[in-house]
Amino acid sequence: MLRELTVDNFETSIDSGVALVDFYADWCGPCKVLGKLMPHLAEKFDGKALIGKVNVDQQPTLTQKFWVSSMPTIIMFKNWQPVEQMRWLRPPHDYVDLVEKWLSDTTETNL
């Protein structure tokens, strides 16, 4: 299930495991294209990784905290730590590969 993330539920939503978070804006054309893919990613990785989205206009605190300046921006988290970032629109397999990469990574992140 695709989860809408806010400042109120962000930390508890991504506190453990792998999470792919899409920082988007409703007015952003490429964000709308990626937005159609996000529910499919959430279904594919259900029970394995959290797939979430943050509306940058409604959640400026999160946008600033993670230095998001262009949309769409994808930030990959593992055990609450941001571990990788992708900007702009990419082919669908890039997002699948990103999640699979971090699901298979057994390294603990303690930054």
Image (tube, rainbow, N blue to C red):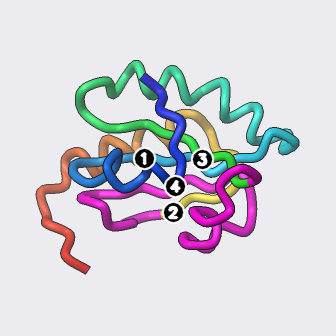
Q: Which residues are magenta?
A: 57-84
**Residue 81: percent from the left, percent from the top?**
32, 67
In the rendered structure, the answer to whether residue 26 lies left or right of residue 46 reads right
Q: Marks 4 and 3, how far apart in space?
A: 9 Å
Task: Find out whether the residues at labels 4 and 3 contact each other: C-beta distance under 8 Å.
Answer: no
Hey, which quadrant is residue 32 in on the image? Answer: top right
Q: Marks 3 and 2, how far apart in space?
A: 14 Å
The disc placed on residue 7 is 4
**Can residue 60 be found in the magenta stretch?**
yes
Residue at the extreme bottom: 111
**Residue denoted by label 1:** 9
Instruction: Look at label 1 and name its amino acid.
Output: Asn
Q: State the SS at label 3.
A: strand
The disc placed on residue 36 is none
**Residue denoted by label 3:** 54
Q: Residue at x 73, y 69 (%)?
A: 69
Nearer to us: label 4 or label 3: 4
Q: Residue at x 42, y 22 (%)?
A: 1
Instruction: Look at label 4 and name its amino acid.
Output: Val
Q: Marks 4 and 1, how far apart in space?
A: 6 Å
Which quarter shows the C terminus? Answer: bottom left
**Residue 67: percent from the left, percent from the top?**
61, 74
Q: State the SS at label 2.
A: strand
